[in-house]
Amino acid sequence: MDLNVKIQINNKNTKQITYTNLYGHFSIRAQQNDKLYCSSITMEKHDLILTKDMLQEKKLIVHLNADYVMLDTVTVYGNRFEKRYRTCFY
């Protein structure tokens, strides 16, 4: 499963928004006690309040879990035939 997707990073204090690149790297202006909100349609949302120690590191690693919905059956109707798929959306 390829979960290499862009994640939106939102500084809730400054209202600044940026996105990760395909390697997960991002840059955003922030200071101590700023709240970062990480979101994507394929990942669980995550809030993070920046501490003094985090800012001194100058590198922040945020682990996000995949977020998906399992559907029992999806029916696709075409002009000439019907197909049934068991599928999973990320």
Image: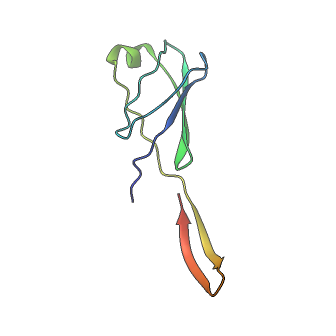
Q: What is the quadrant of residue 52 in the picture?
A: top left
The quarter of the picture where the N terminus appears is bottom left
Q: What is the quadrant of residue 58 in the picture?
A: top left
Q: Position of residue 19 (x, y in %)?
A: 48, 32
Q: Determine the residue positioned at 53% across, 52% down.
A: 67
Q: Determine the residue positioned at 61% across, 17% down.
A: 13
Could you say which is closer to the camera, residue 89 or residue 69? 89
Query: In the rendered image of this protein, does residue 6 appear above or below residue 75?
Result: above
Farthest residue toward the bottom? Answer: 81
- Colour convention: rainbow
Q: Tell how many labels.
A: 0
Q: Is residue 76 left or right of residue 44?
A: right
Q: Determine the residue positioned at 48% across, 38% down.
A: 7
Q: Determine the residue positioned at 66% across, 82% down.
A: 79
Q: Position of residue 60 (x, y in %)?
A: 38, 26
Query: In the rendered image of this protein, does residue 7 appear above or below residue 9?
Result: below
Q: Is residue 14 left or right of residue 60?
A: right
Farthest residue toward the front? Answer: 79
